[in-house]
Image (cartoon, rainbow, N blue to C red):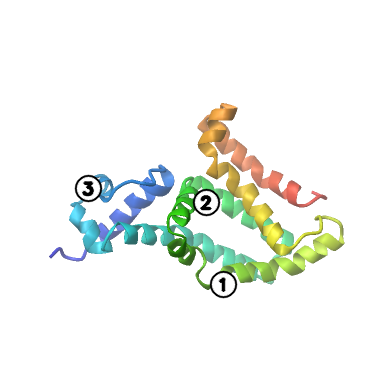
Amino acid sequence: MPVVDAHTEELIKETAMRIFFVEGRLHATTQVIAKEAGVNRGLIYYYFKGRDELFEVVFKEAVAVSRKRIRELFNSKEISFREKIREFVELSIEQHLKYPYREMFMVTEINRDGSNMSMLTDPGGELRNEMLHSISEGLKEEIKNGHVPKMSAEQFIINTLSLCAYPALYKPMLQQTIKMDELAYLKMMQERKQLIMKVLFKDI
């Protein structure tokens, strides 16, 4: 039996994360991951019991940091509603640039096994409820002042997520259709940070 080695386990996870979320090889086999990590394939099954568990582990770790930041952001009493949305947009786009295929992986896995991935995205719906509660009050004030069209907090969240995620989900199609190289795509994504705020809030 192999000796448990934290470095080897971390190497496997980092390699899998790069293959899945950075390079977009969503259906890479354990053999491919093992080869690129420079380890024996049996080590993957030793540390993670199988392919599905490795997927779950790397997905959880990929979203853990951003989920923690989102929770801190929307629970903060020191930041205005609009600043929370601005920081959320910044965080979302930076995560899309860091892991360009993460959302595609998540959609693929939900379609393949919704019961499995739904538990990974937001266990118990706690983050969703916190976001809804935080957004509701601020959104009411913005609607009252005429800065946002009348809508529910759920609709506002969907609008914001869509504006952030669409270019990441359709990156290959966008690049081919608009003839956009990688530098142009990165520039466009950075510009979207301010553009999204102008779309969400009429007075910006």
- State the residue position of label 2: 95
Element carrying mark 1 = helix
Of mark 2 and mark 1, the one earlier in the sequence is 2
Pointer 2 with pointer 1, Cβ within 8 A: no
Classify mark 1: residues with Cα within 10 Å, few (<14), some (14-19) or many (20+): few
Answer left or right for 128 relative to 108.
right
Q: Amino acid at mark 3?
A: Gly
The residue that label 3 is drawn on is 38
Query: Callout 3 environment at 10 Å: few (<14), some (14 to 19), or many (20+)?
Result: few
Left or right, 16 with reference to 142: left
Q: Nearer the viewer, residue 30 or 142?
A: 30
From the viewer's side, name the closer residue of 17 and 65: 17
Q: Is residue 79 left or right of residue 180?
A: right
Q: Position of residue 84 (x, y in %)?
A: 67, 61
Q: Of the residues under marks 2 and 3, which one precedes in the sequence?
A: 3
Compute the Cα span from label 2 to label 1. 21 Å
Q: Residue 180, can we see it?
A: no
Q: Position of residue 14 (x, y in %)?
A: 34, 53
Q: Residue at x 57, y 72 (%)?
A: 126
Q: Which residue is mark 1?
A: 126
Q: Where residue 120 sits in the image (x, y, percent)?
A: 46, 64
Q: Nearer the viewer, mark 2 or mark 1?
A: 1
Q: Residue furthest right?
A: 145
SS at mark 2?
A: helix
